[in-house]
Amino acid sequence: SVRLAAKYSSLNELRNTVIATTPNGGKIKVMDVAEVEDGVAEQKLINRIDGKDAIGISIQKQNDANAVLVADMAKKELKTNVMRVLDSKKLAYNHYAYDNSTVNGVEVARLLGQDPERVFKTLVTRGKSGGFFVFMVPVAEELDLKKAARACGEKAVEMLPQKELLPRTGYVHGGCSPIGMKKQFTTYIHQTAADYDTIFFSAGRVGAQVELPLSALQQALPVTPADIIKA
C-alpha cells in the first residue's frame, strides 16, 4: 500500500502519475508497477496479554460521563449469564475468549492450549419419558446414548435436534452451557472430570469459555459424575 499526500481527481490521474524515469528518458507510471483500486484496506491488529492472544475493545464515552462508571458498565455487558450466575454465588473462575468462528470442540481446546479431555461440551437430550437431560463430555469424545439412558434412569435418550436447542435452553450450538439455561435440567458429567484440578466448558456464548474446579460447578448446580462416553 502507498500513502499519498497529494490530491487526485480520479483514479486514472493517479494511475498515470510518473514515479520514475529510465536512463533513455522513458517514464514509469504508477499503473506500470501496481494495480490502483478505490477502497480501504482492512486493518489487522494482534492483541496479546502476557504473551497470550487477547481481544482489544475500544469504548467511547461522552465528555461528561464518569470513566469509572462507564468501565464498570462495559464489564457487566461483556459478562455472560454463566459468569453472572457464578458471580452471584461468589464462585471463582477464569474466563477465556477465542475466535468465535470456531465451534469445533477439539479446535477450541487447541486454541486454549488445553488437553481436549479437560475441555467439556454440553449436550442436551430428550428421554423416552419426555424429560430433558444434560450431559457434559470431553470435546474429543462421543456421548454413549445407552450409558446416558442408564445414568438418568430412562429407557432411552436421544439428542435434542439443533433447531430446538435455542428455544429450549436459550443457548445456540457451540455456545451451550450447563449453567444459565432457561430451565435447569438434570445434569451429568463424564467421570474423568474429577481427574483434573479444573475443567473448561462454554461460558454461554460462542467464543467464550470458563474454567473452574468440578466442585465449584457442583455448587452452581447439581452435577452427577458418571461413565457416559463411548469406549
Image (cartoon, rainbow, N blue to C red):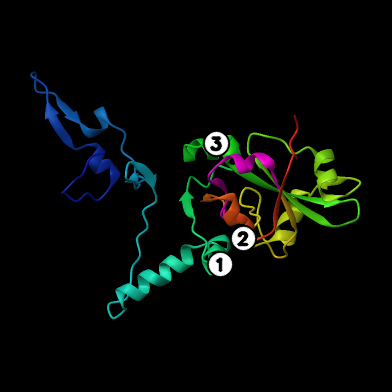
Tell me which amino acid carries mark 1.
Lys
Toward which corner of the image does residue 121 lie, by quadrant? top right
Q: Is residue 77 above or below residue 113?
A: below
Cα distance between the residues tagged 1 and 2: 8 Å
Q: Would you name the residue on which mark 3 appears?
A: 107
| Of residues 169 and 210, the one drawn nearer to the viewer in this rendering | 210
Q: Which mark is residue 89?
A: 1
- Asked if marks 3 and 1 touch (Cβ < 8 Å), the reply is no
What amino acid type should be assigned to the residue bearing mark 3?
Answer: Glu
In magenta segment, residue 197: yes
Among the two numbered marks 3 and 2 on one chain, the one whose residue lies closer to the N terminus: 3
Q: Residues within 10 Å of mark 2 (few under 14, many from 20)?
A: few
Q: Which mark is residue 219?
A: 2
| Picture residue at 49% right of the left edge, 45% below the top | 99
User: In the image, what residue type sits under mark 2?
Assistant: Gln
- On screen, residue 39 versus residue 111, left or right, reads left
- Highlighted magenta segment, given as a residue range: 189-205
Q: Quadrant of the C terminus?
A: top right
**SS class of the residue under badge 2?**
helix
Using residue 173 as the reference point, say whether residue 231 is left or right of it: right
Image quarter of the N terminus: top left
Q: Earlier in the sequence, mark 1 or mark 2?
A: 1
Q: Is residue 146 left or right of residue 51?
A: right
The answer to whether marks 1 and 2 mark residues whose Cβ atoms lie closer than 8 Å is yes
Label 1: element kind: loop
* Residue 61 found in image quarter: bottom left
* x and y, in percent, of residue 23 in the image: 8, 19
**Dot 3 or dot 1, earlier in sequence:** 1
